[in-house]
Image: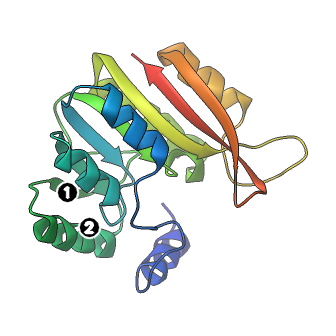
């Protein structure tokens, strides 16, 4: 990850980044209601909102983010919420600190921000860490021909479908203008 990108996130986390609403999305809440708790990993967990939500619903929750400032905040928030969560500062394309298998891997807005080589490492770790029969719940921006934004494209979707089975896809927009997707895959 570039120094400029690291600095950008560092400065975002000095305040409240726009993506950190402090509220878990309805798609995650629906998933939690329909599935038994297990072990979860939140990739790009930020300040831990969704890892905390999972832990409050009985999940053995782990979160990882490259921002030390975000991880510090996540640790404070989880202590205040009274839940025990393992948080790690690490790069999602490398994940040197994470071992074991997870029943759910969650990514809300991380994968789409990675470069091509980082995505390859991320996908390797995704298949390494997800249990057979486990779920991968992904929220991502989607590159279309008419809108050029950071995001995933059809080649990324094909790579994911080669690794896992797509259970559902929900097309939506963020802020009414950025094409985005909710995807649920099963390994």
Q: Are marks 2 and 1 in contact (CB under 8 Å)?
A: yes
Task: Indicate the colouring scheme.
Answer: rainbow
Res 71 label: 2
Lower sequence index among marks 2 and 1 = 2
| Above or below, 117 relative to 63 | above
Asked where in the image residue 29 lies, by quadrant, the reply is top left
Of residues 103 and 82, the one nearer the viewer is 82
Left or right: 138, with 125 as reference point = right
Which quadrant would residue 186 be assigned to in this image?
A: top left
Q: Secondary structure at mark 1?
A: strand
Q: Residue at x 11, y 57 (%)?
A: 83
Q: How many marks?
A: 2
Q: Residue at x 54, y 74 (%)?
A: 4
Q: Say which quadrant the C terminus sits in.
A: top left
Q: Residue furthest right?
A: 146
Q: Is residue 70 in view?
A: yes
* Residue 12 vertical position relative to residue 160 in the rendered view, above or below: below
């Amino acid at each position: 990850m570039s120094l400029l990108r690291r600095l950008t996130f560092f400065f975002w986390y000095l305040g409240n980044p726009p993506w950190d609403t402090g509220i878990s999305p309805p798609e995650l809440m629906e998933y939690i209601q329909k599935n038994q708790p297990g072990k979860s990993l939140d990739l790009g967990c930020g300040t831990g909102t969704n890892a905390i939500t999972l832990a409050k619903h009985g999940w053995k929750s782990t979160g990882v983010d490259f921002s030390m400032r975000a991880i510090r905040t996540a640790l404070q928030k989880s202590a205040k919420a009274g839940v025990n969560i393992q948080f790690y500062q690490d790069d999602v394309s490398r994940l040197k600190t994470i071992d074991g298998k997870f029943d759910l891997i969650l990514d809300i807005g991380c994968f789409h921000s990675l470069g091509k080589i980082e995505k390859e490492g991320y996908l390797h770790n995704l298949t390494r860490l997800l249990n057979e029969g486990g779920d991968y719940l992904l929220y991502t921006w989607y590159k279309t021909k008419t809108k050029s934004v950071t995001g995933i494209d059809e080649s990324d979707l094909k790579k994911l479908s080669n690794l896992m089975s797509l259970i559902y896809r929900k097309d939506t927009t963020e802020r009414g203008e950025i094409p985005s997707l909710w995807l649920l895959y099963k390994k």
